[in-house]
Image (tube, rainbow, N blue to C red):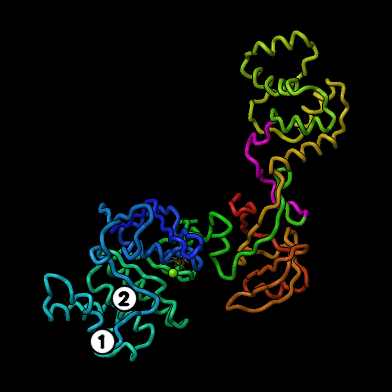
Amino acid sequence: MEVKLENLSKVFPGTKGRPSTTAVDHMNLTIPDGQLVGLLGPSGCGKSTTLYMISGLHKPTEGKIFFGDQDVTNVPPEKRGIGLVFQNYALYPHLTVKQNIMFPLENIRPKMSKPEMVAIANEMAKLVDIDRYMDRKPKELSGGQQQRVAIARALAKKPQVLLLDEPLSNLDARLRLQTREEIKRIQRETGITTIFVTHDQEEAMSISDFIVVMKFGEIQQIGKPQDVYDEPANLFVAKFLGSPAINVFDGLIKNNRLYLNDKLVSNAGFVGKGELDLGSEDTYRVFTEKGFKGNYNDYLRIVYHFDEQNQNEETEKDKSSKDKKNDEPKIEKVYDKGEAITDREFQNIILERMELEGQKLQKLEVEEGLEKLREDNGLNRIVKIAVRPECFEIDEKGKIPVDIKNIEHIGRDVSIVGNISNQDNHVRILIPSELRSQLTTDQLYFSAKKYYVFETSGKRLK
Ligand SMILES: Nc1ncnc2c1ncn2[C@@H]1O[C@H](COP(=O)(O)OP(=O)(O)O)[C@@H](O)[C@H]1O
Ligand SMILES: [Mg+2]
């Protein structure tokens, strides 16, 4: 059964003067039939609230929920055909495993016969591999076994959608791993559309066909686990996925290039075409401060002139100003308006123009003006460079100098903890243990096989 959330919101009203909480904020999501989707995010981001709205236990403040073509937004929970499993197994302690699994079948109308119910209980118990313990009480079972009973009970009514809210959180590490595999297997065998809520990124990554990463009630990214890991949409997602966590350092974008600690990391242009508007008032203002005395329209005329020459037409205004002035700037190259030009071209234009105005400007001053323009327009700025621990390579020509503080073995890898020179944050690097012998000094240079660049706001740039 396909599940579709349309513009779904839940606002909990504030009580006793406390502000209201927007737990889910205009969520749009389609979960294809038969898939297992992991709803992932930190505590309080709205995962449970989303699940309870899908189940019908919470009424949305806004938006709609569809199961297939049917709008179920106002359908009561018991009529939605869902199975729910919570973190605390919530089994009836005085009932046996069999009675627990059969319990939801008791109030089905028309009433089922006892043998029918027992048959279903046996089938479900087999499915979750608990059929040996049918006559035990919950307290005689391990946590993992209890959770399997809870899943069998949720499946007894053959739901169209299975909803699991942190079902593994109360299990110890080994059982958590085992039960996780079980859930995956059961989901595959039954083909039931399943929504699995967890705050544990590794759990979500390993079990899900695709994951939905949430923060503050909003979806950050949807995708296959590996794709989201490899191409995080923003800094939050990059940091939330992966253990050990991704390393983040400060970088600088200057003159369209990326620097780390004054070392050029990438020449790649970080500014799109035509983002610095030569005809803008800003440009005019900056160069006026530098000593340019012509008036604004004169300045603009040059910029427009490029354009008009290109289009072989001139406005009345240009014609009249041409008549007035014979010393029209000689422009060798014709630019399209909005075309990206190099620093040098820009400098030459400015210098030429200044000279025509009788102003002798130094190249350095033009560079400074350009620099200021970039800063004013947010084109030179601090950014975040992020590298996953496994993406470093020892490289004597590398751009990342690391002061090594500690080296330890983690499984087949060597983990290096240190600092990047001039930066506060720790960095953790994983390299294959064969390379251990290369770690001979306290400072080593690394390069990154892959890195991401984010605005300080978290928006991904590269
Ligand atoms: N019944 C409720 N009344 C008021 N606020 C609630 C209620 N349930 C959840 N919230 C708030 O909504 C936000 C999302 O909660 P929840 O969906 O439980 O998050 P998660 O399951 O991701 O940890 C939190 O800020 C939480 O405090
Ligand atoms: Mg929750």
Judge from the rendering whether residue 352 lies leftward or rightward of residue 120; answer left or right: right
Q: Where residue 123 sits in the image (x, y, percent)?
A: 21, 78
Q: Marks 1 and 2, how far apart in space?
A: 16 Å
Judge from the rendering whether residue 82 lies leftward or rightward of residue 48; answer left or right: left
Q: Where residue 262 sits in the image (x, y, percent)?
A: 78, 53
Highlighted range, magenta: 262-277
- Where, by quadrant of the figure, is residue 115 drawn? bottom left
Q: Which residue is mark 2?
A: 151
State ligand 2's quadrant: bottom left
- Residue 313 part of the magenta-drawn span: no
> Mainly helix, strand or loop, the magenta region?
loop
| Figure check: 99 above or below 376 | below
- Where, by quadrant of the figure, is residue 80 drawn? bottom left
Mark 1 closeness class: few <14, some 14–19, many ≥20 residues within 10 Å:
some
**At 75% across and 20% down in the image, what residue appears?**
298
Q: Which residue is mark 1?
A: 95
Q: Which amino acid type corresponds to the residue marked 2 in the rendered image?
A: Ile
